[in-house]
Image: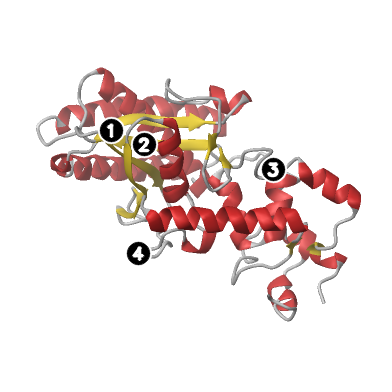
Amino acid sequence: AWTEADGLVKPSRAAREALASHHLQQRSFSPTALQHFAACPYRFLLSAIMRLSPLEVPEPPEEMDPLLRGSLVHEVQFLLYRRLQDDGLLPVTGANLEEVYRHLEQVLAEVTARYHDEVAPAIERVWQDGVAAIRADLREWLRLESEEAGTGWVPWRFEFSFGLTGERARDLVDPSSTPEPARLDCGIQLRGKIDLVERKAGGQLRATDHKTGKVWVHKDAVIEGGKALQPVLYGLALQKLVQGDVSSGRLYYCTTVGGFSDREVPIDEEALEAGRVLGAAIGEAFERGFLPTAPAEGACTFCDYQLVCGPHEEYRTGRKPQQ
């Protein structure tokens, strides 16, 4: 049977009272936080509610790790988009591509110089090789953008944030960002930052989340069992926050590692139903106070909370009642 040793399973009155302020109607969540629920409800509790995180010990990086690389790419994209918009160079086309490349070199030099001072890389040659790889990826990303100019999508808002406060609200964000979360019809209060909002002449909108890692979301997936929420939730949030017809949300894997591929999800009745199922499932977990260690297959492998649970929870809890 499930016991108190299996996470939050049989909450006391005090535990229920503590959990009450975190219900979906009481506070906002990011898509990334909600994705932890599909990986393991107890991971969701530890990360999104108790906000435990690993102790980080600063040390000079010997290589450009994926997190650092992703942060650098996103910042370059944001600053480049702003500069191109100010200079009337959006959308990127074959005719203005060389001028866009010149802007890219300027922005990349500025951003990488600042990051270099902040992280103090241990091996200079490794850092330079990492920057060269990012440069190649960004140039290819822009070349592909120029080929897509005929589709009619024009970059419009960059790092459009909502529901973020404090330091996160003062980060690199679009001027039209709002401190208010998006209150979705499925009962979720959402906060986050949409990397790119594109617009067509007819008023259609598309929400894009840029990814710099490998593709793991299947084609034709909607929310991938709750593990890939950005396309649907960002699309639904955009409907609430901006006037316009939101046609889709997508993940765009904008580097060589991801093959410059995308996963686009139409914001239609199927997406709305997925949002309703998600809201109902997480809402029920809050109502029952039932957030057990019930990891999805493989979820423990790279989990930050193995020190809390141990490495064998997938096997151990898989033998318990699953309904």
Q: Quadrant of residue 6?
A: bottom right
The crowd level at tag 3 (other Cα within 10 Å; few <14, some 14-19, many 20+) is few
Pointer 2 or 4: first along the chain? 2
Separation of residues labelled 2 and 1 (CA atoms) = 7 Å
Separation of residues labelled 4 and 3 (CA atoms) = 35 Å
Q: Which residue is mark 1?
A: 155
- Residue type at mark 3 is Glu
User: Where is residue 147 drawn, in percent x and y?
Assistant: 15, 44
- Front residue of 205 and 260: 205
The crowd level at tag 1 (other Cα within 10 Å; few <14, some 14-19, many 20+) is many
**Quick check: 208 above or below 221?**
above
Pointer 4 or 3: first along the chain? 3
**Quick check: 303 above or below 114?**
below
Pointer 2 or 1: first along the chain? 1
149 to the left or right of 316: left
- Front residue of 180 and 166: 180
Viewer-side label of 1, 3: 1
Q: Secondary structure at mark 3?
A: loop
Q: Secondary structure at mark 2?
A: strand
Pointer 1 or 3: first along the chain? 3
Q: Quadrant of residue 163?
A: top right
Pointer 4 or 1: first along the chain? 1
Viewer-side label of 2, 3: 2
- Residue type at mark 4 is Lys
Tell me the number on the disc at residue 219: 4
Residue at 78%, 47% (x, y): give it.
19
- Residue type at mark 1 is Pro
